[in-house]
Image (cartoon, grey):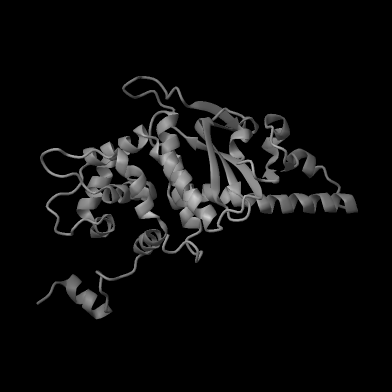
Amino acid sequence: MGTMLDMTQTSLGLDWTSKRTRKREFLDEMERVVPWAALVALIEPHSPRAKMGRPPFPIETMLRIHFMQNWFTFGDQAMEEALIDTPLYRGFAGLNVEADRLPDAITILRFRHLLERHGLALQMFAMVNELLAAKGLMVKSGTAVDATIINAPSSTKNSSGQRDPDMHQTRKGQQWYFGMKAHIGTDLETGVVHSLVTTPANAADVTQVDGLLHGEESDVFADAGYQGAAGWTRAKVNWHIAMRPGKRRALDTSTELGRLTDELERVKARIRAKGEHAFRVIKRQFGFTKVSYRGLAKNTAKLHTLFMLGNLWMLRKRPQLCGA
């Protein structure tokens, strides 16, 4: 006689091994759009080769594990345990279900350090964007610039007894934050993030605008925090910057000029939303709401990886990208 669980499964007609969960669907979609071969070829020259003992795990296996860490916010130890516990993750990584050897936390950590040491996150970000541009998925006629705060631990209860010196506190409205800022330039047509700059949280958004333009755009859209942006760059572009909130609230919408000005602000806000969507993907879809490491360098590498994967995620339904 089967167990109560067995009988329940049978009576409901469910096959748990083939059920299409949201996580399985997500991994299937990313399987189709990530250019695995090109990324592996980029990493391969930097990958060490074992001269004796057990051979290292394939680069693609380690890259797939690294991406799952970014998608599902796993630390190194948590990722090791997830591979042990979850056949879905082992299958995506290309590991045999009956494998007698799985990557441990140290192996996973070493692969991340390899990517950091050689600046490969930035190179992968650039390579994927080149691929998207070649497929017509980055138009480059206009850019939206924006920034967001990424929180960091403000406690000094750690081995050094100090807060992260690369982070800083800043005030937004009536709230104080401690951490870093991610500044991005986004393609107006497709929402693809083409540029990233990171700073401590107290850096003014407008000071970083020159690093967010690729040089081919003719129009740039930004929120009210970018007032005076033209003075921070040599680029000759048309700036479309939001009116300051207080000034907009003072508009007299009973007049035709007031109504037209208010409608223009609404249009600019809808266009700027392309950049805000990229932040939603990394924060809500991928769960990156606080820094993962100490220091700007490691977190910048992670952000390059997240925005690269976010670009692919946002465009996953485009026919040009399938089979990339």
In the rendered view, would you say 38 is above or below 210? below
Could you say which is closer to the camera, residue 227 or residue 115? 115
Q: Is residue 27 left or right of residue 76?
A: right
- The answer to which image quadrant residue 256 occupies is bottom right
Give how far across and how far down residue 81 sits, in percent. 22, 48
- Residue in the foreground of this view, choosing between 44 and 301: 44
* Nearer-the-camera pick, 56 or 255: 56
Q: Is residue 89 left or right of residue 164?
A: left
Residue 53: image location, x then y, percent: 10, 40
- Who's the residue at 44% across and 39% down the image? 122
Q: Is residue 183 visible?
A: yes
Quadrant for the N terminus, please. bottom left
Q: Position of residue 297 (x, y in %)?
A: 43, 31
Q: State whether residue 68 is above or below residue 296.
A: below
Q: Residue at x 50, y 32 (%)?
A: 180
From the viewer's perspective, is residue 200 above or below residue 195?
A: above
- Find the residue positioned furthest to the top: 161
Q: Position of residue 270 (x, y in %)?
A: 67, 54
Q: Nearer the viewer, residue 151 or 272?
A: 272
